[in-house]
Amino acid sequence: MSSAHPSISMKSEIIKIDLQPGFYHVHVDFEFYNEGDSTSIKVGFPHWHYGTSKTNELKNFKTTLNGKSLEYKILEDNGTKTPAHKADIVDLWFVRDITFSSKAITKTSVDYDCEYGVAGFYKGVEYLFGTGQTWKNPIGSQTIEITNNISPTSVILCDRTFFVESDKWKTPDSWKDTQITNDGKKITITRKNVSPDFFDLFRFEIADEYFLFNPYGDYDSQNYRLGKNLLTEKDLIFFTNEQLLYMRNIILANHGNIFQELSEIELANLQAIQKEEARRK
């Protein structure tokens, strides 16, 4: 919906996702640079039916321009569809009039709340960034920050966290040009020179209490049972400090804190958890 312009580039996109008990809040900071003459254009932010749910709405939408509140209009779309997911459509646009000064940086932001999508047994979160293709050059840098404030037992699933790009799912194992860090307060994912297709998105899923309360139980669709499957560094980086502590303690509690009774897998998982905890200090 944003009007493409040959002289305006998106220098950076910082996406902050705050997970709350009944919804998630998204704040996005955009930074543009106009190398041409000063120009005013209409810029749209998409409201689309997410793949995890067909009823999600972006609520409490707000937007700013260079730090000041900006008015917007809601325009209907004729039903833009993805090639791969015919049911996923952009149905509305939040449209703002923005003036991009010549040879200058322009900063704009959006805020909104959204209910979690439904992805089988899990909660789903998605952010569509593909509309960044309408600007000159790739997105210079893209940062995604995720803060988990749902509950100590709500877990971001590593193998259900991915980018969908050009209709292909890219999981953390294939994020060659992507850095992931966790400082104990938030997960930060950073990428450079992103060239998206229009419907490219970032997506992850969350499980509630599905393994922390019963790590040795039979339900193990994600292979996180602490006694039978090795935890990798990329698994652990998605956990909060409280969840790491819980996992470490539950391994020891099952054996009365006696290290000699731990299996090789349990010992390896314990050491991996301790290494991740030490890295965050």
Image (spheres, helix red, strand yellow):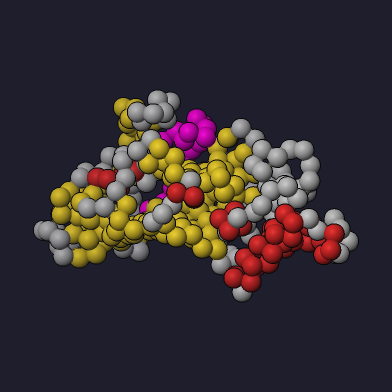
Residue drawn where x is 64% and y is 67% of the image: 275
User: Residue 97, position in %: x, y?
Assistant: 25, 49
Q: Residue at x 78, y 61 (%)?
A: 249
Left or right: 137 as drawn, with respect to 239 = left
Measured as percent of width and height from the top left, residue 40 is found at 18, 52
Work out which quarter of the rendered image holds the N terminus and state it. top left
In the rendered structure, the answer to whether residue 97 lies left or right of residue 265 reads left
- Which corner quadrant holds the C terminus? bottom right
Highlighted magenta segment, given as a residue range: 48-65
Residue furthest right as drawn: 256
Residue 64 magenta: yes
Q: Quadrant of residue 218?
A: top right
Residue 96 in view (yes/no): no
Q: Is residue 152 left or right of residue 104?
A: right
Query: Quick check: 59 above or below 254?
Result: above
In this view of the protein, which residue sits in the foreground, 184 or 114?
184
Which residue is at 41% across, 54% downward?
Answer: 176
Please say whether residue 140 is one of the residues in the magenta stretch.
no
Q: Residue at x 64, y 50 (%)?
A: 155
Q: Position of residue 14 (x, y in %)?
A: 40, 58
Q: Nearer the viewer, residue 71 or 259?
A: 259
Residue lying furthest left: 37
Number of numbered discs on residues: 0
Work out whether residue 239 or residue 35 is closer to the camera in this orientation and state it: 239
Residue 95 against residue 80 in the figure, above or below: below
Q: Among all residues in the image, which is located at the extreme top?
A: 86
Q: Position of residue 146 (x, y in %)?
A: 52, 56
Residue 8 visible within the image = yes
